[in-house]
Image: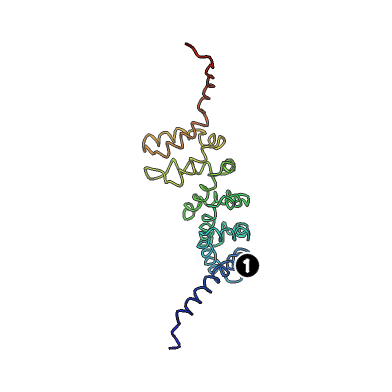
Amino acid sequence: MSGCVSGGHRLNLAVRSRCLIPYITYHAIYHISCHTSHIVNWYGIDFAIQAVAFLKKLSIFKENKDEMRQCNIVQALMPFIPAPSQDMTMATLRLILNLSFDTVMRTQVVKDGIIPKLVKLLKVAAMRHLSLKVLYHISMDDKCKSMFTYTDCIPMVVNMVQNFPDKFVEKTLIALAINLAANSRNAEAMAAGENLNGFLNRLFQSKDPLLAKMLRNLSQVFFPPPTPPPSSTPSSTTVR
């Protein structure tokens, strides 16, 4: 009978658990966020990967994300893009992808210089898709679009779009290209040389609607729609 727990005790345990979970979560976020680099040195890279993966699961909740922001988690994660271990880099990218849905966190990762780091990771096939997703989130902010102009991102995106093996360009990649093409300097770089002809040839062959949208953005930069003439104010005098 000693192994049986009465209904009252079960309820008490449940209430205590609900009280403990936020406490445990807060301290987990605090210690992992503030001491990520030390965790690698103290416990090894495998433990650090699990810790970052745990933070990724917690980051789907706004209150946890807010705690991470207060702990300056972005600054703690930057040294791991890239990390010596590819698995650690992937875990970090997954966490940053979750965090980048938040506008404030997205601004923070840009300030901490993530764009050139992600552009370099585009060259690594295993990390390309995650890197493209984070870059796409960043490119949604108009003030960030110009930051892509003087990186290798533009020629790399152009090359990947024009030489994508499938009929339709992968959605994350073309979505990034669409956003980048909405900036005038990016558009000039994307259309330089024979790039525009390459895009048009691919469009004629594939009939890709998202590629057409990207070309529409390019055309609006080079050929903005005419400003409509001012509407004439109707005369107050009634003609009979």
- For image coordinates 46% across by 37% down, the residue present is 214
Q: Nearer the viewer, residue 147 or 10?
A: 10
150 in relation to 57, above or below: above
Local packing at callout 1 (Cα closer than 10 Å; few below 14, some 14-19, many 20+) is: few
Q: Nearer the viewer, residue 27 or 235?
A: 235
Identify the amino acid type marked 1: His
- For image coordinates 49% across by 44% down, the residue present is 176
Residue 234 drawn at (x, y percent): 52, 18
Q: Quadrant of residue 166?
A: top left
Residue 79 drawn at (x, y percent): 61, 58
Residue farthest to the bottom, as pictured: 1
Helix, strand or loop at label 1? It is helix
Residue 19 drawn at (x, y percent): 55, 71
19 in relation to 98, above or below: below
225 in relation to 34, above or below: above
Residue farthest to the top, as pictured: 240
Residue 97 drawn at (x, y percent): 52, 54
Q: What sort of colour scheme is used for the picture?
A: rainbow
Q: Nearer the viewer, residue 177 or 54?
A: 54
Task: State the residue position of label 1.
Answer: 38
Instruction: Give the number of callouts.
Output: 1
Residue 237 horizontal side relative to residue 108, left or right: left
In which quadrant will I find the N terminus? Answer: bottom left
Residue 164 horizontal side relative to residue 148, left or right: left
